Protein backbone atom coordinates (compact mmCIF):
# COMPACT_ATOMS: atom_id res chain seq x y z
CA UNK A 1 0.00 0.00 0.00
CA UNK A 2 1.41 3.38 -1.01
CA UNK A 3 0.82 6.32 1.32
CA UNK A 4 1.40 9.95 0.42
CA UNK A 5 1.94 12.30 3.36
CA UNK A 6 1.79 16.04 2.82
CA UNK A 7 3.67 18.33 5.21
CA UNK A 8 6.46 15.79 5.84
CA UNK A 9 8.89 18.58 6.68
CA UNK A 10 6.61 19.95 9.42
CA UNK A 11 6.35 19.22 13.13
CA UNK A 12 3.74 16.44 13.08
CA UNK A 13 4.63 15.26 9.57
CA UNK A 14 8.27 14.57 10.45
CA UNK A 15 7.23 12.46 13.47
CA UNK A 16 4.63 10.61 11.40
CA UNK A 17 6.88 9.79 8.47
CA UNK A 18 9.65 8.50 10.73
CA UNK A 19 7.15 6.35 12.63
CA UNK A 20 5.92 4.91 9.31
CA UNK A 21 9.47 4.32 8.05
CA UNK A 22 10.22 2.33 11.21
CA UNK A 23 6.92 0.49 10.85
CA UNK A 24 8.01 -0.77 7.43
CA UNK A 25 4.59 -1.92 6.25
CA UNK A 26 3.97 0.93 3.78
CA UNK A 27 5.53 2.27 0.62
CA UNK A 28 5.96 5.92 1.42
CA UNK A 29 5.81 9.15 -0.54
CA UNK A 30 6.06 12.64 0.87
CA UNK A 31 4.81 15.88 -0.60
CA UNK A 32 7.10 18.81 0.08
CA UNK A 33 7.93 22.22 -1.30
CA UNK A 34 11.65 21.59 -1.33
CA UNK A 35 13.59 18.43 -2.19
CA UNK A 36 16.57 19.86 -0.30
CA UNK A 37 14.67 19.69 3.00
CA UNK A 38 13.86 16.03 2.34
CA UNK A 39 17.32 14.63 1.63
CA UNK A 40 17.30 12.47 4.76
CA UNK A 41 13.86 11.09 3.98
CA UNK A 42 14.81 10.32 0.38
CA UNK A 43 17.88 8.48 1.70
CA UNK A 44 15.55 6.38 3.85
CA UNK A 45 13.55 5.35 0.77
CA UNK A 46 10.74 7.90 0.82
CA UNK A 47 9.77 9.07 -2.66
CA UNK A 48 9.63 12.87 -2.59
CA UNK A 49 7.01 14.55 -4.75
CA UNK A 50 7.46 18.31 -4.94
CA UNK A 51 4.40 20.52 -4.92
CA UNK A 52 3.08 23.72 -3.43
CA UNK A 53 -0.44 23.96 -2.04
CA UNK A 54 -0.85 27.42 -3.49
CA UNK A 55 0.22 26.36 -7.00
CA UNK A 56 -2.56 24.14 -8.38
CA UNK A 57 -0.48 23.09 -11.41
CA UNK A 58 2.17 21.61 -9.13
CA UNK A 59 -0.47 19.44 -7.43
CA UNK A 60 -1.75 17.91 -10.69
CA UNK A 61 -0.97 14.19 -10.74
CA UNK A 62 0.57 14.21 -7.26
CA UNK A 63 -1.67 11.36 -6.09
CA UNK A 64 -1.04 9.12 -9.10
CA UNK A 65 -0.38 5.57 -7.89
CA UNK A 66 -1.25 6.51 -4.30
CA UNK A 67 -3.65 4.44 -2.17
CA UNK A 68 -3.88 6.68 0.90
CA UNK A 69 -3.28 10.40 1.37
CA UNK A 70 -2.58 11.82 4.83
CA UNK A 71 -2.99 15.55 4.40
CA UNK A 72 -1.09 17.51 7.03
CA UNK A 73 0.36 20.39 5.02
CA UNK A 74 -1.23 23.67 6.03
CA UNK A 75 -0.62 27.17 7.19
CA UNK A 76 -0.76 26.53 10.92
CA UNK A 77 -0.63 30.13 12.09
CA UNK A 78 -3.27 31.63 14.34
CA UNK A 79 -2.65 35.23 13.35
CA UNK A 80 -1.93 34.94 9.63
CA UNK A 81 -4.01 36.93 7.14
CA UNK A 82 -7.30 35.31 6.08
CA UNK A 83 -6.38 35.34 2.37
CA UNK A 84 -3.18 33.35 2.96
CA UNK A 85 -4.85 30.94 5.37
CA UNK A 86 -7.63 30.34 2.88
CA UNK A 87 -5.28 29.79 -0.06
CA UNK A 88 -3.31 27.18 1.88
CA UNK A 89 -5.89 25.48 4.02
CA UNK A 90 -9.02 25.58 1.86
CA UNK A 91 -8.02 26.08 -1.79
CA UNK A 92 -4.91 23.88 -1.42
CA UNK A 93 -6.91 21.10 0.26
CA UNK A 94 -9.56 21.20 -2.47
CA UNK A 95 -7.00 20.94 -5.30
CA UNK A 96 -5.26 18.02 -3.57
CA UNK A 97 -8.55 16.24 -2.83
CA UNK A 98 -9.75 16.73 -6.41
CA UNK A 99 -6.55 15.13 -7.64
CA UNK A 100 -7.14 12.25 -5.20
CA UNK A 101 -10.68 11.85 -6.56
CA UNK A 102 -9.39 11.67 -10.14
CA UNK A 103 -6.80 9.05 -9.17
CA UNK A 104 -9.25 6.95 -7.13
CA UNK A 105 -7.35 7.26 -3.85
CA UNK A 106 -8.87 4.74 -1.44
CA UNK A 107 -8.62 6.84 1.72
CA UNK A 108 -8.09 10.59 2.17
CA UNK A 109 -7.18 11.38 5.78
CA UNK A 110 -7.51 15.05 6.55
CA UNK A 111 -5.72 16.32 9.63
CA UNK A 112 -7.90 19.14 10.88
CA UNK A 113 -7.96 20.55 14.42
CA UNK A 114 -10.18 20.96 17.48
CA UNK A 115 -9.93 24.67 16.66
CA UNK A 116 -12.90 23.99 14.35
CA UNK A 117 -14.90 23.42 17.55
CA UNK A 118 -13.10 26.18 19.43
CA UNK A 119 -14.27 27.05 22.96
CA UNK A 120 -16.85 24.81 24.63
CA UNK A 121 -19.31 25.80 27.34
CA UNK A 122 -19.68 22.32 28.87
CA UNK A 123 -16.27 20.66 28.69
CA UNK A 124 -15.28 18.33 27.27
CA UNK A 125 -16.50 19.00 23.75
CA UNK A 126 -16.83 16.07 21.38
CA UNK A 127 -17.43 15.28 17.70
CA UNK A 128 -21.06 16.41 18.06
CA UNK A 129 -20.14 19.83 19.45
CA UNK A 130 -21.16 22.64 17.11
CA UNK A 131 -18.57 24.45 15.05
CA UNK A 132 -17.47 27.55 16.94
CA UNK A 133 -14.02 28.56 15.66
CA UNK A 134 -12.69 31.82 17.04
CA UNK A 135 -9.58 32.08 14.88
CA UNK A 136 -9.47 32.43 11.08
CA UNK A 137 -7.15 29.39 11.13
CA UNK A 138 -9.96 27.30 12.66
CA UNK A 139 -12.49 28.81 10.24
CA UNK A 140 -10.44 27.68 7.23
CA UNK A 141 -10.11 24.18 8.69
CA UNK A 142 -13.88 24.10 9.27
CA UNK A 143 -14.51 25.15 5.66
CA UNK A 144 -12.31 22.31 4.41
CA UNK A 145 -14.00 19.80 6.72
CA UNK A 146 -17.44 20.81 5.43
CA UNK A 147 -16.33 20.63 1.81
CA UNK A 148 -14.76 17.20 2.30
CA UNK A 149 -17.87 15.92 4.06
CA UNK A 150 -19.89 17.10 1.06
CA UNK A 151 -17.56 15.20 -1.30
CA UNK A 152 -18.09 12.09 0.83
CA UNK A 153 -21.87 12.45 0.75
CA UNK A 154 -22.24 13.40 -2.91
CA UNK A 155 -19.43 11.42 -4.55
CA UNK A 156 -18.52 8.77 -2.00
CA UNK A 157 -15.05 10.31 -1.64
CA UNK A 158 -13.49 8.15 1.13
CA UNK A 159 -12.49 10.73 3.74
CA UNK A 160 -11.68 10.68 7.44
CA UNK A 161 -11.29 13.84 9.46
CA UNK A 162 -8.88 13.83 12.39
CA UNK A 163 -8.96 16.67 14.88
CA UNK A 164 -5.95 16.80 17.19
CA UNK A 165 -6.01 19.23 20.10
CA UNK A 166 -2.98 21.47 20.56
CA UNK A 167 0.07 19.26 19.99
CA UNK A 168 3.35 19.43 21.88
CA UNK A 169 6.63 17.64 21.40
CA UNK A 170 10.15 17.92 20.03
CA UNK A 171 10.14 19.87 16.78
CA UNK A 172 7.30 22.23 17.65
CA UNK A 173 8.64 25.73 17.19
CA UNK A 174 5.36 27.56 17.53
CA UNK A 175 2.71 27.37 20.30
CA UNK A 176 4.54 25.20 22.85
CA UNK A 177 7.90 26.83 22.29
CA UNK A 178 6.44 30.30 22.65
CA UNK A 179 4.57 29.37 25.85
CA UNK A 180 7.37 27.40 27.46
CA UNK A 181 9.95 30.06 26.59
CA UNK A 182 7.84 32.84 28.12
CA UNK A 183 7.56 30.90 31.39
CA UNK A 184 11.13 29.60 31.42
CA UNK A 185 12.49 33.11 30.90
CA UNK A 186 10.34 34.45 33.75
CA UNK A 187 8.47 36.80 31.38
CA UNK A 188 5.08 36.12 32.95
CA UNK A 189 5.06 38.55 35.84
CA UNK A 190 1.36 38.22 36.72
CA UNK A 191 -1.35 35.67 35.97
CA UNK A 192 -4.06 37.01 33.63
CA UNK A 193 -7.32 36.62 35.58
CA UNK A 194 -7.96 33.36 37.41
CA UNK A 195 -6.61 31.17 34.58
CA UNK A 196 -9.05 28.54 35.77
CA UNK A 197 -10.37 27.44 32.37
CA UNK A 198 -9.31 24.21 30.71
CA UNK A 199 -6.73 23.87 27.96
CA UNK A 200 -5.87 20.61 26.21
CA UNK A 201 -2.55 19.49 24.76
CA UNK A 202 -1.60 16.09 23.34
CA UNK A 203 1.90 14.70 22.95
CA UNK A 204 2.95 14.30 19.31
CA UNK A 205 3.61 10.53 19.55
CA UNK A 206 0.01 10.03 20.68
CA UNK A 207 -1.26 12.10 17.75
CA UNK A 208 0.83 9.94 15.41
CA UNK A 209 -0.67 6.80 16.98
CA UNK A 210 -4.14 8.24 16.40
CA UNK A 211 -3.36 8.84 12.73
CA UNK A 212 -2.02 5.27 12.45
CA UNK A 213 -5.22 3.89 13.97
CA UNK A 214 -7.21 5.65 11.25
CA UNK A 215 -4.79 4.49 8.54
CA UNK A 216 -5.03 0.87 9.70
CA UNK A 217 -8.81 0.86 10.17
CA UNK A 218 -10.41 2.36 7.05
CA UNK A 219 -13.49 0.18 7.44
CA UNK A 220 -14.57 1.96 10.61
CA UNK A 221 -13.06 5.35 9.94
CA UNK A 222 -14.15 6.34 6.42
CA UNK A 223 -16.86 8.99 6.62
CA UNK A 224 -16.05 9.66 10.27
CA UNK A 225 -14.52 12.47 12.31
CA UNK A 226 -12.30 11.70 15.31
CA UNK A 227 -10.91 13.93 18.01
CA UNK A 228 -7.38 12.74 18.81
CA UNK A 229 -6.51 13.93 22.29
CA UNK A 230 -4.60 12.99 25.38
CA UNK A 231 -6.54 11.75 28.41
CA UNK A 232 -5.80 14.80 30.48
CA UNK A 233 -6.84 18.41 30.25
CA UNK A 234 -5.95 20.91 32.93
CA UNK A 235 -6.55 24.57 33.76
CA UNK A 236 -4.24 27.17 32.26
CA UNK A 237 -2.96 27.83 35.77
CA UNK A 238 -2.06 24.17 36.31
CA UNK A 239 -0.44 23.85 32.89
CA UNK A 240 1.68 26.97 33.44
CA UNK A 241 2.57 25.70 36.94
CA UNK A 242 3.73 22.39 35.42
CA UNK A 243 5.93 24.24 32.94
CA UNK A 244 7.31 26.45 35.71
CA UNK A 245 8.13 23.41 37.84
CA UNK A 246 9.83 21.59 34.96
CA UNK A 247 11.88 24.65 33.97
CA UNK A 248 12.74 25.52 37.57
CA UNK A 249 11.13 28.94 37.77
CA UNK A 250 8.55 30.46 40.14
CA UNK A 251 5.10 31.07 38.72
CA UNK A 252 3.78 34.54 39.67
CA UNK A 253 1.48 34.45 42.69
CA UNK A 254 -0.33 37.67 41.85
CA UNK A 255 -2.96 37.95 39.16
CA UNK A 256 -4.07 40.91 37.10
CA UNK A 257 -7.59 41.59 35.76
CA UNK A 258 -8.11 40.37 32.21
CA UNK A 259 -8.70 43.91 30.88
CA UNK A 260 -5.33 45.09 32.21
CA UNK A 261 -3.57 41.94 31.02
CA UNK A 262 -4.89 42.61 27.54
CA UNK A 263 -3.66 46.21 27.57
CA UNK A 264 -0.19 45.05 28.60
CA UNK A 265 -0.04 42.21 26.06
CA UNK A 266 -1.38 44.51 23.32
CA UNK A 267 1.75 46.64 23.66
CA UNK A 268 4.04 43.62 23.26
CA UNK A 269 1.92 42.34 20.39
CA UNK A 270 2.20 45.71 18.63
CA UNK A 271 5.96 45.87 19.20
CA UNK A 272 6.41 42.31 17.88
CA UNK A 273 4.27 43.07 14.84
CA UNK A 274 6.46 46.04 13.95
CA UNK A 275 9.50 43.78 14.14
CA UNK A 276 7.76 41.04 12.10
CA UNK A 277 7.79 38.62 15.06
CA UNK A 278 4.89 36.16 15.46
CA UNK A 279 5.20 35.04 19.09
CA UNK A 280 2.06 33.03 19.91
CA UNK A 281 2.14 33.64 23.67
CA UNK A 282 2.21 37.43 23.37
CA UNK A 283 -1.13 37.99 21.69
CA UNK A 284 -4.28 39.41 23.27
CA UNK A 285 -6.14 36.48 21.70
CA UNK A 286 -4.38 34.15 24.16
CA UNK A 287 -5.62 36.26 27.07
CA UNK A 288 -9.13 35.85 25.62
CA UNK A 289 -8.53 32.10 25.27
CA UNK A 290 -7.76 31.92 28.98
CA UNK A 291 -11.35 32.92 29.76
CA UNK A 292 -12.94 29.96 27.95
CA UNK A 293 -12.64 26.18 28.01
CA UNK A 294 -10.84 24.21 25.31
CA UNK A 295 -11.13 20.61 26.43
CA UNK A 296 -12.21 17.69 24.31
CA UNK A 297 -13.21 14.06 24.66
CA UNK A 298 -11.23 11.23 23.05
CA UNK A 299 -13.98 8.69 23.85
CA UNK A 300 -15.03 8.11 20.22
CA UNK A 301 -11.46 7.42 19.05
CA UNK A 302 -10.99 5.06 21.99
CA UNK A 303 -14.20 3.17 21.36
CA UNK A 304 -14.09 2.88 17.57
CA UNK A 305 -10.36 2.90 16.82
CA UNK A 306 -8.95 1.45 20.03
CA UNK A 307 -6.90 4.63 20.44
CA UNK A 308 -4.87 4.63 23.69
CA UNK A 309 -2.80 7.74 24.43
CA UNK A 310 0.35 6.86 26.38
CA UNK A 311 1.68 10.23 27.52
CA UNK A 312 0.52 12.26 30.48
CA UNK A 313 0.70 16.01 30.01
CA UNK A 314 3.59 16.22 32.45
CA UNK A 315 5.63 13.55 30.64
CA UNK A 316 4.91 15.23 27.29
CA UNK A 317 6.02 18.60 28.63
CA UNK A 318 9.11 17.04 30.17
CA UNK A 319 10.21 15.53 26.83
CA UNK A 320 9.42 18.75 24.97
CA UNK A 321 11.35 20.91 27.45
CA UNK A 322 14.31 18.53 27.30
CA UNK A 323 14.36 18.97 23.50
CA UNK A 324 14.20 22.79 23.77
CA UNK A 325 17.10 22.72 26.22
CA UNK A 326 19.18 20.47 23.94
CA UNK A 327 18.47 22.81 21.02
CA UNK A 328 19.32 25.87 23.18
CA UNK A 329 15.85 27.26 22.48
CA UNK A 330 15.12 28.01 26.13
N1 LIG B 1 0.76 21.67 15.82
C1 LIG B 1 -0.42 21.63 16.39
O1 LIG B 1 -0.57 21.96 17.58
C2 LIG B 1 -1.62 21.14 15.61
C3 LIG B 1 -2.81 20.90 16.32
C4 LIG B 1 -3.92 20.45 15.63
C5 LIG B 1 -3.85 20.27 14.27
N2 LIG B 1 -2.70 20.53 13.59
C6 LIG B 1 -2.70 20.34 12.13
O2 LIG B 1 -1.67 19.40 11.82
C7 LIG B 1 -1.10 19.73 10.56
C8 LIG B 1 0.40 19.83 10.70
O3 LIG B 1 0.70 20.81 11.67
P1 LIG B 1 2.20 21.10 12.11
O4 LIG B 1 2.14 21.62 13.48
O5 LIG B 1 3.05 19.94 11.77
O6 LIG B 1 2.54 22.32 11.15
P2 LIG B 1 3.97 22.85 10.68
O7 LIG B 1 5.06 22.39 11.55
O8 LIG B 1 3.80 24.32 10.46
O9 LIG B 1 4.16 22.15 9.26
C9 LIG B 1 3.40 22.55 8.15
C10 LIG B 1 3.80 21.68 6.99
O10 LIG B 1 3.03 22.11 5.85
C11 LIG B 1 3.93 22.42 4.80
N3 LIG B 1 3.41 23.51 3.99
C12 LIG B 1 3.10 24.76 4.40
N4 LIG B 1 2.71 25.49 3.35
C13 LIG B 1 2.81 24.69 2.26
C14 LIG B 1 2.56 24.87 0.87
N5 LIG B 1 2.16 26.05 0.39
N6 LIG B 1 2.75 23.83 0.04
C15 LIG B 1 3.18 22.64 0.51
N7 LIG B 1 3.45 22.40 1.80
C16 LIG B 1 3.26 23.43 2.66
C17 LIG B 1 5.22 22.85 5.48
O11 LIG B 1 6.29 22.74 4.57
P3 LIG B 1 7.61 23.66 4.65
O12 LIG B 1 8.60 22.85 5.46
O13 LIG B 1 8.03 23.81 3.24
O14 LIG B 1 7.24 24.94 5.30
C18 LIG B 1 5.28 21.83 6.60
O15 LIG B 1 5.75 20.60 6.13
C19 LIG B 1 -1.75 21.02 10.10
O16 LIG B 1 -2.74 20.70 9.16
C20 LIG B 1 -2.36 21.60 11.36
O17 LIG B 1 -3.51 22.34 11.06
C21 LIG B 1 -1.59 20.96 14.23
Image (spheres, helix red, strand yellow):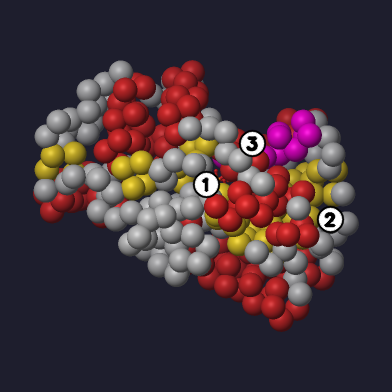
What residue is pinned by disc 3?
A: 15
Element at label 2: loop
Q: Which mark is residue 66?
A: 2
Q: Considering only order in the chain, which callout, 1 or 3, is on the residue closer to the N terminus? A: 3
Q: Residue at x 52, y 56 (%)?
A: 113
Is there a contact, CB below 8 Å, between mark 3 and mark 1? no
Q: Considering only order in the chain, which callout, 3 or 2, is on the residue closer to the N terminus? A: 3
What residue is pinned by disc 1?
A: 229
In this rendering, would 138 be left or right of 123?
right
Q: Residue at x 79, y 46 (%)?
A: 29
Q: Residue at x 56, y 62 (%)?
A: 89
Main secondary structure type of the part rendered in magenta: helix
Element at label 3: helix
In front: label 2 or label 1: 1
Q: Which mark is residue 114?
A: none
Magenta-span inclusion, residue 17: yes
Determine which quarter of the picture holds residue 56. bottom right
Q: Considering only order in the chain, which callout, 1 or 2, is on the residue closer to the N terminus? A: 2
Amino acid sequence: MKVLITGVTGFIGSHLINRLINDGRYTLAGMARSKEKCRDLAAKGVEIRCADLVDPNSIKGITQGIDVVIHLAAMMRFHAPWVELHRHNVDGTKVLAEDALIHHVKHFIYVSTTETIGPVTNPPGDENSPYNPTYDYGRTKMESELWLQQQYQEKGFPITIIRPTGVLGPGDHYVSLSTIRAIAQGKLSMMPGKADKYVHFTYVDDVVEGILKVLDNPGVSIGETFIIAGDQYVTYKDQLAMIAKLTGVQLPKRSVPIVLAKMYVKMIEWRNKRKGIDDFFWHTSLVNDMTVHRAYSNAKAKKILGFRPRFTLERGLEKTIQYYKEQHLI
